[in-house]
Image (cartoon, rainbow, N blue to C red):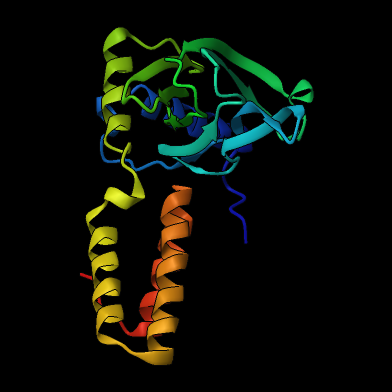
Amino acid sequence: LPYQSYDPSTIVALGAAIQAACRLRSEDIEEVILTDICPYSLGVEVNRQGVSGIFSPIIERNTTVPVSRVETYSTMHPEQDSITVNVYQGENHKVKNNILVESFDVPLKKTGAYQSIDIRFSYDINGLLEVDVLLEDGSVKSRVINHSPVTLSAQQIEESRTRLSALKIYPRDMLINRTFKAKLEELWARALGDEREEIGRVITDFDAALQSNDMARVDEVRRRASDYLAIEIP
């Protein structure tokens, strides 16, 4: 049963105060652990099958923050010398019905071939969104978008970026996934016939999950494969 001895307005005010204090990292509540969610999907505008203005979510709404997600895209033609990154928030398939958050251009080196581009969004409880564009030559173009409901100092912004940087790791580079992949390869090498074929399918599924850069998907595929093949991963 709900408590009836507390004033609802007081409870709401206390909750808002705790939320604001956590965002400001108040020393008075260092022992409070607060998880927040991204209230809306964040993504970029893409062209798919010749249709422009499509919204491609990178961080979906209700994702627990802090979070860092990456998606891989491709240039539209081989001689492309720049891309425009249009960042949107919303839940509509067409970007025209969502909210444009930021737009910036990233120059490309002409290679005469289609280029693969990783776009990473990192978002924290302060409302700070960091957009990293990783090009094939290894260079990274970054843009910080401040959506905080309170004014953040330069130091607070830098602290947020430091915390977010710890999340910027590809699933394929994580020790647990490298260890699991090595174990799968070892099992495949020892197996024969139908068993080898089955393990091969598991490897293919795991590789596809790693390629997606979706941490939740990777964790789920690894868990199911571990249970199925009775693999113990420390």
Residue visible at 60% across and 38% down?
7
Name which quarter of the figure residue 102 lies in.
top right
User: The C terminus appears in which quarter of the rendering?
Assistant: bottom left
x%, y% of residue 84? 57, 15
> What x and y, as percent, mark residue 122?
42, 31
Q: Is residue 37 left or right of residue 223?
A: right
Vertical relation: 234 (above or below) 81: below
Q: Residue at x 42, y 15 (%)?
A: 109
In-image side of 85 versus 139 (left or right) = right
Observer able to see residue 52: yes
Total marks shown come to 0
Say if 104 sits above or below 120 in the image. above
Q: Residue furthest front?
A: 112
Res 179 quadrant in image: bottom left
Residue 156 vs residue 33, the one in the foreground = 156
Residue 40 visible at all: no
Question: Which quadrant: the N terminus?
Answer: bottom right
Residue 92 location (% of width, % of height): 76, 33
Judging depth in this view, the residue of 123 and 149 nearest the camera is 123
Write the residue at 26% across / 26% down.
162
